[in-house]
Amino acid sequence: MDIESTLERLSKSKFRASFHLKRDDIEYIKTKGWDTIQAHCYDFITKRLAPAVIDNDGKQTPTHGHPVFKAQHACACCCRGCLSKWHKIKKGISISNDKVNEIVELLMAWIHKEFENYKETTIPPKKKEVKPQKPIQLKLF
């Protein structure tokens, strides 16, 4: 699997391109470290995607709550259906260790790219609209 061309192809999908890391994800990565994030990738893929039969296939990956979950959706590695459609990994067959390694490499590449490109976007607070006051008419006499 060519990581860069795969990421490029995925970025052309409006749905896949809609996933991005947020501030909480960035902080989580900084706190846990890259080795832990990679370990989580392996754990999620081997337990939730690698088995030949998955009872809740198509619903096993949340869309938020962990940087790896977002990466899985962005990279079409969230369920066996997406793996089949985007990566030609057949359903109903256990995923080999080599394929698991490729998937983790893709997820980590996406997470690294998102981490490096992260810019905190804050919406400036709206300025309170100050209504002009009516001029006060002073009585001179």
Image: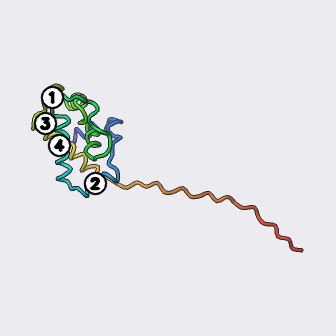
**How far separated are the C-alphas under marks 1 and 3?**
13 Å
Q: Which mark is residue 43?
A: 4
Q: Amino acid at mark 1?
A: Ala
Residue that badge 2 annotates: 28
Mark closest to the chain's N terminus, 4 or 3 = 4
Q: Residue at 35% across / 40% down in the picture?
A: 18
Residue that badge 1 annotates: 52
Q: Determine whether, in the image, residue 110 is placed left or right of residue 42.
A: right
Q: Amino acid at mark 3?
A: Lys
Q: Determine whether, in the image, residue 138 is placed left or right of residue 95.
A: right
Query: Which of the two discs, 4 and 3, sits closer to the camera?
Result: 4
Residue that badge 3 annotates: 99
Crowd band around label 1 with a 10 angstrom C-alpha radius: few (<14), some (14–19), many (20+)? few
Crowd band around label 4 with a 10 angstrom C-alpha radius: few (<14), some (14–19), many (20+)? few
Mark closest to the chain's N terminus, 1 or 3 = 1
Residue 35: give x, y in percent of width and height.
17, 53
Q: Are marks 1 and 3 in contact (CB under 8 Å)?
A: no
